[in-house]
Image (spheres, rainbow, N blue to C red):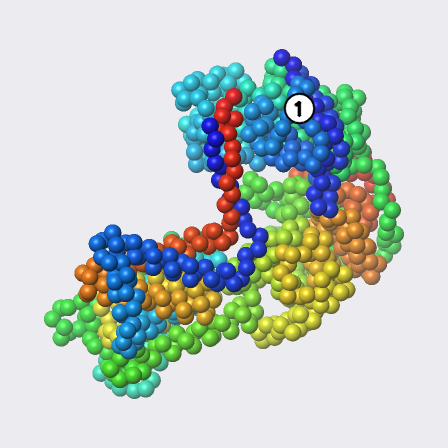
Amino acid sequence: MEDRLIKIEKRNDVPTTLYFFTPFIAIILTIIGGGIIFYTLGFNPIEALKFYFITPISNLYGFSELLLKATPLCLIAIGLSFCFKSNNWNIGAEGQLTFGAIVGGGVALLFYNQEGFYILPLIIIAGAIGGMIFALIPAILKTYFNTNEILVSLMLVYVSKLILDYLVVGPWSNPEGFNFPETRQFSDSARMPLLFEGLRIHAGILIALAAVFVSWFVLYKTYLGFQIKVSGLSLKTAKYAGFKGKTMILIVFMISGACAGMAGVGEITGPIGQLHRMISPDYGFTAIIVAFLGRLNPFGIIFASLVVSLTYLGAETTQIFLQIPQYTGQVFQGMILFFLLASDYLLFFKIKFQNFNKNELRH
Amino acid sequence: MATDLRISNISKIYPGCIANDNVSLQFKSGKIYALLGENGAGKSTLVKILSGIISPDNGEVFLNEKNLKLSSPLDAKKNKIGMVFQHFNLFETLSVFENLSIDATEDNKSLRVRINEILKKYNFSIDLDVPVLNLSAGQKQKVEIIRCLLRSPKVLIMDEPTSVLTEQETEELFISLKKFCDEGILIIYITHKLKEVLSLCDEVAVMRKGKVVSVSQTQNEKVETLASKMVGQKLAKIKKKINTSKNKDEIFKVKHLNFYSDDPFETNLVNLNFSLKKGECLGIAGISGNGQNELFQILSGEIITPDTSIIFRNKEIAKLNPKQRREYLMAFSPEDRISQAAVPELKIYENVALNNFKSSNFFEKGLVNERKIKEHSKKILSDFSVNTDNVELKSQFLSGGNLQKLILGRELITAPELLICYNPTWGLDVGAINYIHETLIKINDEEKSTILISTDTEELLKLSDRIAVIYKGKLSKIMPSVEVTPEKLGILMGGGSID
């Protein structure tokens, strides 16, 4: 009885160009996979894909929506890249976003009947601090109590969502809001300035772009960035070099939390304008995909955030035109991650087939 | 039926090192054979060839005069050669029975009957339905042995089986092995522990540097004779002049160094005390796994132990991390050059920046000073004759010898007062070894001190002024190297005592 035995070996040297090219392969495979799904649902795949990927950005408004949704994704993913690069698996950005929005939103509500140029910066700083504090919880538990940051940061997502729930239903709910679970509208001074009349794209995108440049500088030009890089490649080496491991864990979580918190503030002071239950369509989780699709590279993340943002928009348009549930967006996001991980696997490992005779196992 | 295993002219050459050099041995059932040698003597390579994991470049293996083609572990199994490795190959979360049934070819019911027979016959008490992770090391080893026995082996090879066992478990193992032997199974016992050879084995083959240097009856051997065979008498040609002046300043002093670990693969250290003078080289000998790893990490500051006092240049440094210790002019060269001392994915100049000390100005105000690091790296590459001048090259493309030169260069270019190195020439070719030995001697000539933790006795005798042996986390008394013979070292390394 002849059988094939599969052997998996690590490739020694992976070309950098191919490393940055595989995300494109993943995207193409996602599009093909999406087409197959549409076909099995009984739609013309080309047509459906057009509705999904082209229609949403075929006009200026659509393009502004693309940037609007890419903004929080990009900002959060930039923060996450600090964690992921240094081997810290913060997957609770959604919680840090929510808590940042709560703290920032609280400041906005304090000033609900006031005007002033200082209000928005205060809210943004408050949001960043909120996210930072919330990210420090898993970081401190990891460094001083050896807990697993994946579990803690994930579970804290639900904690922050429940806190938000309580606040918008209870103490912070709008006195004139007929018991709807939402707060007052923020004052105009507490809103992100719009960049163009009639479009929803707001100044938050400038924060995201600034974060891209700052993170590039920090990661590639500073001692902190060097320590992050070394720790990510080999914790043993980082220890041997005498890097302050615990401090670094705290710092990367703080950076990550601050970015997520600011993304939350961008949402509530931008398109939403108040606090309510649904301030984020899981941007914090989707940003994990963005970070990896962008290869944890600041400029790669810009590109990745646009692609993933398009999956949100596509889901909306296909829902309108083809009456397919909006959850197709998550299907597409899942496929992107799946294909990226799969192609990465093939990039880093080679699979060999060997013949062997099963009868040899018997004696 | 009697079994006769013959190894004929086996050679295996790795780049830069001959692991097995024309090895011929003969084993007959009814006896327990020991294969004795230091780390890197070639025992493991030979065993891997017998179990089909690697193929020899040359030579043949005969079992009962039948020429065996051992090109995979399956071939070894097919030919009834069983092997119990030092590190167990068990699925921790599966039950004992599930582990044993994985590669069985019979149905579970008859398998269970057979396993129970074996348990009864050899008096093993193991619950077949508990997960393997709940077993002690000795019990896990028994599971591995049962796995071999289920295939009714003709040859059973045990690779350093007692390294994870308690004294009690070791005794039990020896009783079982003697039983197997009486039943006609040929047993090959690989070890570096001399006493075990004498108490268990009938015949002993000693390997050194890939060659079989002696085959003899154990009844004609003593700990001393085996030790000298294992370590070798031959002393190398370059020998430094011994640093004897007694009135030099003490530069480094360790007091009450204790280390306790919950990890069964780590060794506890018990009350180590030693000191070092300016320009002196203190050698610490021992077979690997006796606490050298832990000692190195404590000396470098990767592990901080409470109550230990380390005085360096009149300052207490026991609580400082490696980076802070470097500021006091200490330098470290760990054993694991590929994943600890350097990162293969990083470029040469980035690896150089790992030794970042204040006066280097590699990182000014938190920013990377790439120009400075590259200049510095170029100097290291040329001063320490690394065979490239491209600082942008990823370190994974350097050979072991060149990588070690880069690491030593990185550590030494700061002109440290004390260098602590652990197996600096491990796995290197002769040329690189000579270069590194010369470098280490030069440091002592310049009145800088070194602590050399090494498993290579020849290297230690060549470079050290004084030598101590570490065995099971305890340090022997420190002896002037002129009074030390390879024989003495061998006895101490094998757990014996002298005078």
Residue at coordinates 82% horizontally, 61% vertically from top-left?
Answer: B446
Query: Who is closer to the viewer here, B466 or A148?
Result: A148
Amino acid marked by disc 1? Asn
Query: Who is closer to the viewer here, A78 or B464?
Result: A78
Q: x, y (%) of residue A98?
A: 31, 66
- Left or right: residue A79 compared with residue B259: left
Give the letter of the chain under mark 1: B
Residue at coordinates 84% horizontally, 58% vertically from top-left?
Answer: B445
Q: x, y (%) of residue A2?
A: 48, 31
- Left or right: residue A38 compared with residue A18: left
Query: Measured along the vertical axis of the image, is residue B390 above or below residue B80?
Result: below
Mark 1 crowdedness (10 Å alpha carbons): few <14, some 14-19, many ≥20: few
Residue at coordinates 75% horizontally, 36% vertically from top-left?
Answer: B21
Query: Measured along the vertical axis of the image, is residue B417 above or below residue A126?
Result: above
Location of the C terminus of chain B (image quadrant): top right
Q: x, y (%) of residue B54?
A: 63, 36
Q: Secondary structure at mark 1?
A: strand
Residue at coordinates 36% horizontally, 69% vertically from top-left?
Answer: A306
Per the image, the residue denoted by label 1 is: B67
Is residue B336 in view from this perspective?
yes
